[in-house]
Image (spheres, rainbow, N blue to C red):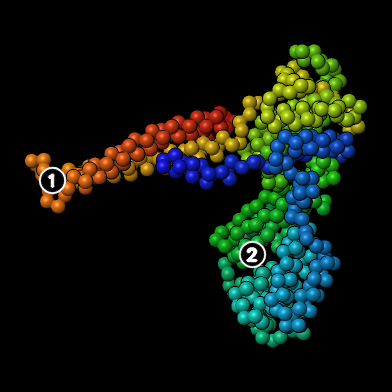
Amino acid sequence: MIWSVAITILLAAAPALAEEKLAVIAVADPPEGPSPALAEMAQQVRAACRERASGVEEVAEMRARLLGAAPGATLPELERAYQGALAAFEALKFESSARTLRAIIEDLEKLPESAEAYQQWIRAHLRLGAVERVQKHGAPARAAMARVAEMEPAYAVDFVQYPPSFLLEFEEVRRQVLARPRRKLTIDSTGEIGRAFVNGKYVGTTPVTLSLPAGRYRVGAERDGRRAPEIRVDLEEADRSLRVDVALAAALRIDRGPGLALAAENRAAGVVRAGAWLDVERLIALSTAQARESSFLDGAVTEGSSFLHGAIYDVRRGALLREGRVRVDGGGIPPGHAAALASFLLSGKPVSPVTPVDRKLVDLTPLAPGSGPGAVDVAARSPRPAWLRPAAFTAGAVALGLAGFATYEAISAGNANRSADAMLRPDGNFVPGVDRATYDRQRADASSAQTAAYMSAASAIVFAAAAGVLGYLSRDERWAPVVRF
């Protein structure tokens, strides 16, 4: 029974041990970013990773995430959908009209911010409020009208399109919104100035500070047509300050890998932030590099050799796990080199032609634009598999559960023994009403509970030791255990 409890707990923790998501991107110096040749090599390494692991992200999905949520429709299509919602309303198909309007709002919030998209968003909310009101859905109707009043406190409802009763209710909602406490929202950006948006409305260039009614809002930013991921901010209780990553948005090169144009000194931090945008646990960044000295210990590399450099990061910890470089010839990667590099990065095990070298003996610099790629050296750190941390916490949870179960069984055994003792008189005979069978059952229950207590305690010690070992193995980059007992 004890082991069945442990197995049940482990199975409940199985999602934490599920296969991680992995992305592969190309990275090169700004302003051009990755070359078409590097983008092609990234695709080859991605395909090789896919043969060796599940959870490798597809290019289309990566591009959609890096650009922001992929819209389900264009503005002209949403305009036609809005006209369809009006037609459904006029045909008294109110629920159908409301569903269409909610879908329109959802798609508008995924589109790049623009004045036209924002006006459609305002219009759709206002119409949704009217449709919900006709259906006697008071709360949803007022919520839709409040979204308009929050962003446009002086908005004038068209009395031709809406009845007087709706105008009166909108005025009441407006007064309620204006009576809310005011909150200060400060929007800043990383490194570069960006254009900031709240609920799709342009509010100025960063840094910008706004006063808004208490509530929840969508915050976005863009630079040079490239969007930073949207942030949902809660201003119900307090002021907030946000920093949007327009620098990384400007570095995106969607059709090159997809890739990033990042300078070498900012590359690691930018790659990790891109991994967070992609919502992956691990990320492989590929770039080209060139050796300017011929000081390898094994003499396998000569001055001027070019490399395809791969680095794999643990996105959640911001940790570089290992790096590897393989030689490429004639501007492309030789057969088998992509597979070797992928195998090394994923497993950490040396694979020919990938060979470990002393990084201190080699001066590696980014390739100049137009230079060819090329040989193999590797600087690897001992990998810390990502499953170690959830396994450590799971083992710790099992240990605590078993310790609690052992305590319960020990108490039960003591109670059963005391009950059995109470069945005997001082002379050793049974008290009236008690027979031998009843007494023996009580003693057997006490013995069974005592055995379960010992087994549970021993198992708890085993799982606690396992948690300690796994916690030590999952230590962070400062070699500090993440689980301590």
Task: Provide the residue designation for mark 1.
Answer: 430
- Residue at 79%, 48% in the rendered image: 60
Front residue of 33 and 181: 33
The tag on residue 260 is none
Residue 441 in picture, x, y percent from top left: 25, 45
Rounded to the nearest whole Å, what is the CA distance between mark 2 and mark 1? 81 Å
Q: Where 330 sits versus 361, above or below?
A: below
- Quadrant showing the N terminus: top left
Q: What element carries label 1?
A: loop
Could you say whether the residue bearing mark 2 is in a helix, strand or loop?
strand
Name the residue located 37 percent from the left edge and 35 percent from the top edge.
455
Q: Is residue 428 above or below residue 146?
A: above
Quadrant hosting residue 104: bottom right
Q: Is residue 481 left or right of residue 162?
A: left
For this rendering, which residue is in front, 22 or 424?
Answer: 424
Q: Which of marks 2 and 1 is nearer the N terminus?
A: 2
Residue 19 in the image, given as x and y percentages of width and height: 64, 41
Amino acid type indicated by mark 1: Phe
The picture quadrant where one finds residue 160 is bottom right
Q: What residue type is labelled 2?
A: Leu
Residue 308: x %, y % from top left = 81, 29
Mark 2 or 1: the one toward you: 1
Residue 436 appears left or right of 404:
left
Tell me whether circle 2 and circle 1 mark residues in contact (CB < 8 Å).
no
- The residue pinned by badge 2 equals 212
